[in-house]
Image (cartoon, helix red, strand yellow):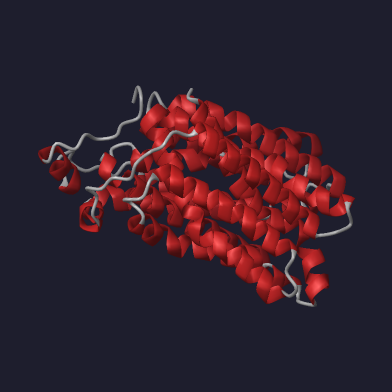
Amino acid sequence: MKRSIYVLALGAFGIITTEFGVIGVLPNISRQFGVSIDTAGWLLSAFAITVAVSSPFITSFTTRINRKLLLCLVMSIFVISNLISAFSANFTMLMVARILPAILHPLFWNISSAIAFKERGAKGVSTILLGLSLATVLGIPLTTFAADLFNNWQASFYLSSGISLIAFMGLLLFVPSIPGDKGKSANHQLSILKSPLLWINLISAISTLAAMFSSYTYLTAYLEDITRMDGAQVSMMLLLFGGMGTIGNWLMGIALSRNVILTARLFFVLLIIVQVLAFYFGGAFTLMVIIVSLWGMIHTGGFLVANIRTTQFVPHHALEFVNSLLTSSYNIGISLGAFLGGVISVRYGVHYVLWGSILLLGITFLLSFITFPKDIAVYEKAEETGIQETRCEHV
């Protein structure tokens, strides 16, 4: 696989570490600036909302700019914003420092995913998403550890800045120049919105991520309250969950490169089964170790399933724009899932958050059986204008 794709995966590692690394230092920030913990939590929520809102627009406005230049610009902004965060004198300054990279965050995902998909299909995208998986396994714990080691919350931002700087140098040295498409226009890209298949896939992406995060967001609480694990044991389970996720992401890439729709349906069924097992055997310590391992292996593949299902037949000219819609869908799904899981947890108890996830997965599974004629809307137009469709290798 091309070296540039691995560099893009490193960039994904840096970006996700910046986005979620703040979780481990929220109590420190709350005490430092005299704000409540839920107010401090807006450092994460505001980041996600900004990404969801800015994604389609920032991509449309930059279609004619060199893609390497944009990738390097995004990573440089992440380097600087992390340093500003570390030197923030008040909470407002810290919030602004978080919003700045969030505006450009979608550019990296949309461009890198499009590059990887064009180069290596599902396998390429799975490599990019491996950076996401590793960030949850290593990046977030590392930034939290740095803050504890130096007894200073700013250390987490210094580390995030350093990771982003290494990724920036990798992009500068190993990613070739990729000119923007001077022929692209907003109307040309927006023509893809006429496709009902696209909208079904975007709705499926939202429901998939909502299902995943309505339960995963409360996994710690589930392990503490239902499985009766202590803090150290929960930490090990989360590490196991993420570690198995990296393996699952790799396997999902291979499976999707062979049959997208069958793999997607299998993903929904397997995640339903593992969460049913977690519900009925949640109180059994040893069994839950095995279940969490399987859960982590299956869970991470959801990002890849949603991506490949949506982009596999998208024309080249609209690929980055569709990726921008996916980025928004991911963030909407994550926020919606966390909200629904929270409502279920408060009203019925954390044990029942799994059934909310199972219901959403069942609905998404049924959506996968909705089909449309191949010559519908934009795809027919794409063929008439001679635009070659982007397809997964070996699909």
Instruction: Kindly identify the residue that appears in the image at 75 percent across and 71 percent down.
Output: 37
Instruction: Kindly identify the residue that appears in the image at 44 percent across and 63 percent down.
Output: 54
Query: Viewed as shown, does residue 393 lie left or right of 124?
Result: left
Residue found at the far left of this picture = 384
User: Is residue 294 at least partly visible in the picture?
Assistant: no
x and y percentages locating residue 28 in the rendered image:
82, 65
Instruction: Kindly identify the residue that appears in the image at 85 percent across and 59 percent down.
Output: 152
Query: Viewed as shown, does residue 148 lie left or right of 169?
Result: right
x and y percentages locating residue 310 in the rendered image:
36, 43
x and y percentages locating residue 273 in the rendered image:
57, 38
User: Is residue 233 at least partly visible in the picture?
Assistant: yes
x and y percentages locating residue 60 in the rendered image:
33, 57
Q: In which quarter of the image is residue 43?
A: bottom right
Q: Foreground residue, 194 or 60?
A: 60
Q: In this view, does 179 lie above or below 157?
A: above
Query: Viewed as shown, does residue 379 lie left or right of 303?
Result: left
Instruction: Kindly identify the residue that appears in the image at 70 percent across and 40 percent down.
Output: 137
Q: In this view, does 237 lie above or below 258?
A: below
Q: Quadrant of residue 90?
A: bottom right
Q: In this view, does 65 lie above or below 347?
A: above
Q: Foreground residue, 29 or 366?
A: 29
Q: Quadrant of residue 373?
A: top left
Q: How many labels does the image show?
A: 0
Q: Foreground residue, 130 or 370?
A: 130
Instruction: Please state, as top left, top right, bottom left or bottom right, where the C terminus lies in the image.
Output: top left
